[in-house]
Amino acid sequence: MSSTAGNAKGTRCVALLGPQSSGKTTLVESMLLASGTITKRGRVTDGNTISDTAAEARARQMSTELTPVRFSFMDDDWIVIDCPGAVDLIHESHQGAMIADAAVVVVDPDPNKMLALGPVLRFLDEHKIPHILFINKMDVIQGSVGELLTAAQAQSGRPLVLRHIPIIEGQNITGYVDLVSERAYHYKLDQPSEQIPYEDAADIDPEAARRELLEKLSDFDDALLEKLLEDIVPPKDEVYQHLTKDFAEDLIVPVLIGAAEHQHGVIRLLKELRHEVPVAAETADRRELPADGFVGQIFKTTYAAHIGKLSMIRVWRGTLKDGDSLAGHRVTNMQDGAEPKMGKAKVTSVNAGDVAALSKVELGHAGAIVTAEGSTDPKEWAVPPSPLVGTAVSTKDRKDDVKLSDSLRKICEEDPSLSVEMIAEMSELQLRGQGDIHIQIALDRLKRKFDLAVDTQRPQVPYRETIRKGTTEHSRFKRQSGGHGQFADIKVEIKPLPRGSGVQFSDSIVGGVVPKNFIPAVEAGVHDNTARGPLGFQVVDVSVNLFDGQYHSVDSSDQAFRTAGRMAMTDGLPKCDPVLLEPIYEVSVYVPTDFTSRVQRAVTQHRAQILGFDTREGWRGWDAIKANIPESEMQNLITDIRSISLGIGTFEAKFSHYQELVGRDADKVIQTRKQNLEAHA
């Protein structure tokens, strides 16, 4: 672990965010190369990058979990967090951003892909996290910077401030002009850029762009505005001061260009970070964290082989040493939290700004603020999104059932955007997440970390059934087998009820034909048989009234009357015109306005009843489509939405009501349920 001794700024932390395949991991490699930490840049396709070390990431050639990596640049200590770009893993990225002093949002130089920036930039703005926009892969001209900036600005709630203009020769971008320093640089492959005479930057006119930069800064400073109105050119030092102040307060978003794969613009980015990123104490003040003593924050839980549970913590204030007491626990065996191969490097202390992995201590969930005295919830943290898809999981060997439950709990602790729920009526354990990729990564992790392979299947839908008409049923249970026999005789009236009424039991017994002490047993028998009706599902919206019967002073018992209650429902419900009910969810689909009409058409293919659409509250350029959709149609809904909306559309759903399902769809459901019950009999 690099020491912060003599470094007044301590260790600063930057999160790399942005859409999938924008080049974040490659940028990490280029940062490490530029800082001298490594001598050769790894490649994602070769599986030899410093971050993305997990087997799930290597297999998919994409980041699957946040990875902190440390380096030093110009005597400053840094931790860069490589965050996943896949929309399924957005919560992982949010957790990385929440403990960073600033973020770098990496994006492709394609105006059509700038829509994907919307959710990322909005999250950063909501939490006032300073951020830079790094337009990557700017080695070949693919359109004007103006077009890129216009498209990106439409997704940002903060003004974008262009810092660089590319130098173009033919179809290639060979360098850039820095609008503040008024210097020009020529790129050199895998080497620092070479300064060239400013006047040699042909075919460009940076003065208009520089004027626009200053005008955007003047929106936040009246004195600067007055100078511009009087045509007074502010000195460069003053411009840098404005940039640093406005960036730290998340008032502006500086925009830099480069091509990480060729090392272009990387040193310029590092210098920008060095001058403008706040230190940990300033970030802690912004987050309104405790001002005195040691203050740390858990940002992730992970389980490592031969070590067990590790709590990843960022130190905001003070120093944490091996043997210190933290939230009532003695800290031992601290690991370097910025070592991608977790558990490979022990440390004895960590200072403000650094990250560590603490083992064998229970410090709370991700987001918890930890001091020597205790652990508390933060004022703000990344809220896990609601699950969008699920799969039913089961062990290949029943003896592993307990192990499965414990392992799934740990997987969900590592990733709070996963959840597990036992659906008792379907006898299913369901793992839920943000998409098919998310679920598959979790299952791969389950196998790798806990040596537990599972069987999966599409989750069963918890249909219900009810009746359309009533009947009267007479049920008699009589058994004689030596000694006391069994006797119960009842008459019940079964009638349908309005939706949402449940199962209601009553009695109108007069004259003691059924003694009061046996009536609860009849009710229990009724409920026994409403758990699974003639169609194979739970019965709802039915009333059962016990109005007559007989008993025997010796042979009658609770068990006999309970059996009679079950028999009455078994024989009576099929006579009441049973009908299937399917659960309907109220769904809000959120997509950029450009895709609203196409998504509406796609949603109707899921047997949806469109209720209307409106602008999404607080989201410029987004719509919210309201619809009622059967639960059986929602398993692939997110896939269809994302395939239309550049992967960024999403939805929220809540249970609304049950409605009748008839015809072939109902017949298919009933037949499938029958087969499942027979298979598990």
Image (cartoon, rainbow, N blue to C red):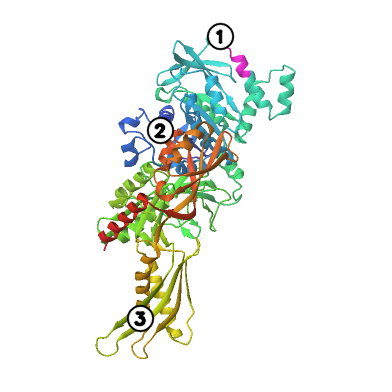
Mark yes or no: residue 677 visible. yes
Residue type pointed to by label 3: Gln
Q: Quadrant of the N terminus?
A: top left
Count the marks: how many? 3
Instruction: Please state the extent of the stretch shown in magenta in the rendering.
Output: 204-210
Mark earlier in primary sequence (2, 3):
2
Q: Residue at x 50, y 14 (%)?
A: 167
Type of secondary structure dominating the magenta stretch? helix
Residue type pointed to by label 2: Thr
Label 2 crowding class (10 Å Cα cut-off): few <14, some 14-19, many 20+? many
Label 1 crowding class (10 Å Cα cut-off): few <14, some 14-19, many 20+? few
**Residue labelled with disc 3:** 559
**Residue labelled with disc 2:** 25
Give whichever of 657, 548 is nearer the camera.
Answer: 548
Disc 1 to disc 3, C-alpha distance: 100 Å
Mark earlier in primary sequence (2, 1):
2
Disc 2 to disc 1, C-alpha distance: 35 Å
Q: Name the secondary structure under disc 2.
A: helix
Mark yes or no: residue 354 visible. no
Residue 162: image quadrant is top right
Give whichever of 155, 253 is nearer the camera.
Answer: 155
**Residue labelled with disc 1:** 199
Residue type pointed to by label 1: Glu
